Amino acid sequence: MYKGLICFTAFAALSAGANAQVSALINYPVADVLGHREFQFNHNFTSADSKLTGQYLHSHNYVLGLFDVAEVSGIADFLGSHTFGLKFTPYRSKDEKFAFGFGWQGLSSDAVSHFEYGRYTIGDYNLHFGYQHDDEDRGVFGFDHAFSQQWGCSAEYVGNSTGSSAYSLFYTMKSGLVLQGIYTKPHDFATEANYTFVLTYTFRI
C-alpha cells in the first residue's frame, strides 16, 4: 500500500443511524464520524503490482462510532499486520454545513501519523480538505456526491510526489450494505495505478 494511506477506509452511502451521512472515504479520512454505537465493517480487494504477482490483496477494516464525536478503527492485511486509528470531530456548525476533525493513524506501529480535516457542504456535494502528516506533509482536497439513494461518487487528491489521485463509484445494494470501486493513480508515474473493490456493511450495536 502507498505511504500516507489512512486506516479509516469506509465510504458508506447510508449509515445505520437516523441521520445518514458519509463517515469516511477510501484511503482518506473526512471530518465527520459515525453515530454512537454505529459499527462499519469493510472487506477490501486491491490489485497488486503486475510485475510482482498480478493478484489481488485482501484486507479488512472496521470503524466504531462513539458518542457522535469519535471513531475508533482497525485494519488488518491477513499477513499479521494490524494497526489502529482514532478520530475526533470536536466541532459541527448548527446547520451541519461545516465540520472539523482530527486524528491519528498507525497507532500500533512505528509509523504513527496524524491528520486534520474539514468538511463543507454545498447543496448535494460534500467538500473535504485538510492535511496528512507523517515523514512528509500532504495537502488533501476532494468531494463526494450522491446521485440518488443508490448511486454516488467521490474524488480525492493528495499533494506532492508521494501522493495520489483517487476516483470512486459506489452502489447501495440495501440499507447499510454498499459496494464500491476505486481507481487510484500515484503521482509517481513509475508506480502502477491500482483498483480496489470494497464491500461495506454498517449497523448499530
Image (spheres, helix red, strand yellow):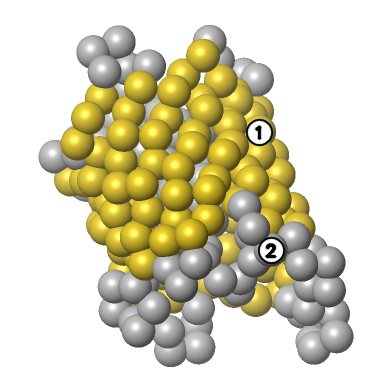
**Sequence-first tag of 1 and 2:** 1
Residue at 56% over, 71% down: 3
Q: Is residue 172 left or right of residue 69?
A: right
Residue at coordinates 79% horizontally, 72% vertically from top-left?
191
Whether residue 199 is visible: no
Query: In front here: 164 or 10?
Result: 164
How crowded pointer 2 is (Cα within 10 Å; few <14, some 14-19, many 20+) is rated as few
In this rendering, the answer to whether 96 lies above or below 40 is: above
Find the distance from the CA under tag 1 to the CA under tag 2: 25 Å
Q: Position of residue 55 (x, y in %)?
A: 77, 79
Examine the image and state in which quarter residue 51 appears: bottom right
Q: Secondary structure at mark 1?
A: strand
Coordinates of residue 30 in the picture (x, y in percent): 42, 41
Residue assigned mark 2 = 161
* Cβ atoms under marks 1 and 2 closer than 8 Å: no
What mark, if any, has residue 153 been given in the picture? Answer: 1
Q: Residue at x 64, y 29 (%)?
A: 152
Residue at coordinates 70% horizontally, 51% vertically from top-left? 165
State the mark number for residue 171. Answer: none
The percent position of residue 77, horizontal first and vertical second, equals 50, 78
Can the viewer see residue 50? yes
Q: In the figure, residue 110 lies in which quadrant? A: bottom left
* In the foreground, 108 or 17: 108
Vertical arrangement, residue 171 with respect to residue 158, above or below: above
Q: Residue placed farthest to the left in the image?
A: 67
What is the quadrant of residue 85 in the picture? bottom left
Q: Residues within 10 Å of mark 1 (few under 14, many from 20)?
A: some
Q: Determine whether 162 is above or below 122 in the image.
A: below
